[in-house]
Every structure is written in C-alpha cells, then in structure tokens.
Image (tube, helix red, strand yellow):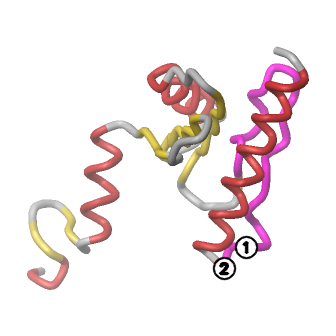
Amino acid sequence: MGKFSRDKGKRGERSTATELRECFPELAEEIRRGWQAREGDDEADVIGVPGYWFEVKAGKSIQILKALEQAHSASVNKRSIAVPVAVLRPDRKEPFVALYWTDFLMIIRRIFDYEYGQTRKDR
C-alpha cells in the first residue's frame, strides 16, 4: 500500500473519531484512532465507544463485505464481544456503515428498550 493510500486511511480514521466524539461528548476523551501495527490487527481503527469494533475504510473502490469480515475477524481474535462495524468512506460520497443483520436487530431492540419478545415495561 502506498503512502497516499495510507494517508487517506488515516484521514478517514481521524474523521470517524472526530464525528464519534461530537456524537458522544461524554466519551470524547476516550475516543481516538486505535494503535495499529504493520499487520493492522492490534486495535480497532477507532476505539473508545464501548461495545463496538470500528474498521474504517476510505477510497474509491471499497470492498464492503471484506471490510465487515475484517472487523468481525479482528474482534473475535481479540476475544472481544464488540459489535463489528465497517465504516465506509467512499471518495466524494456520503460515508456509511455495514454491519451484520443480527447485530443491527440487537441495536434496534436496545433503542426501543425491547428484549426477549416483550418490552421491559411489560415485565
């Protein structure tokens, strides 16, 4: 990977960290780019949001499934129970995320305070 591609990736990670800090001001001090070894598997690309493993990809042609599988594989290798999230930042387009359907359903259930087929208020 060339220097330009590495720099683009770093910019994408910085932007993601900045946007997450703005979204979660109470976690702002914790959210930052993760430490990356040459192999790129030491920490998530962006850390500090508990329960989520962020893999950030930036560029012209992003392989969505590969990015999501990388996030999943890295989180499993670290024995993490974090939800793998691929943050995709295509050139000159709106960033978006990819996650597994089961993880998405779990997140939606939490948002609506819903668990095990009933609302918590019904228990």
Percent across and percent down for residue 65 are: 45, 22
* Label 1 sits on residue: 28
* Disc 2 secondary structure class: helix
Query: Where is the C terminus found, in terms of image quarters?
Result: bottom left
Residue type beneath disc 1: Ala
Q: Residue at x 21, y 65 (%)?
A: 115
Q: Nearer the viewer, residue 50 or 12?
A: 12
Look at the image and give the residue range highlighted in magenta: 26-46
In the current view of this chain or complex, which residue is farthest to the front?
92
* Label 2 sits on residue: 25
Checking the image for residue 112, the label placed there is: none
Horizontal side of 107 relative to 64 (left or right) equals left
- Look at the picture and state if 1 lies above or below 83: above
Percent across and percent down for residue 112 are: 24, 72
Query: Where is the N terminus found, in terms of image quarters?
Result: top right
Percent across and percent down for residue 77 are: 62, 27
State yes or no: discs 1 and 2 in contact (Cβ < 8 Å): yes
Percent across and percent down for residue 13 are: 73, 46
- Look at the picture and state if 8 lies above or below 107: above
Horizontal side of 97 relative to 111 (left or right) equals right
Residue type beneath disc 2: Pro
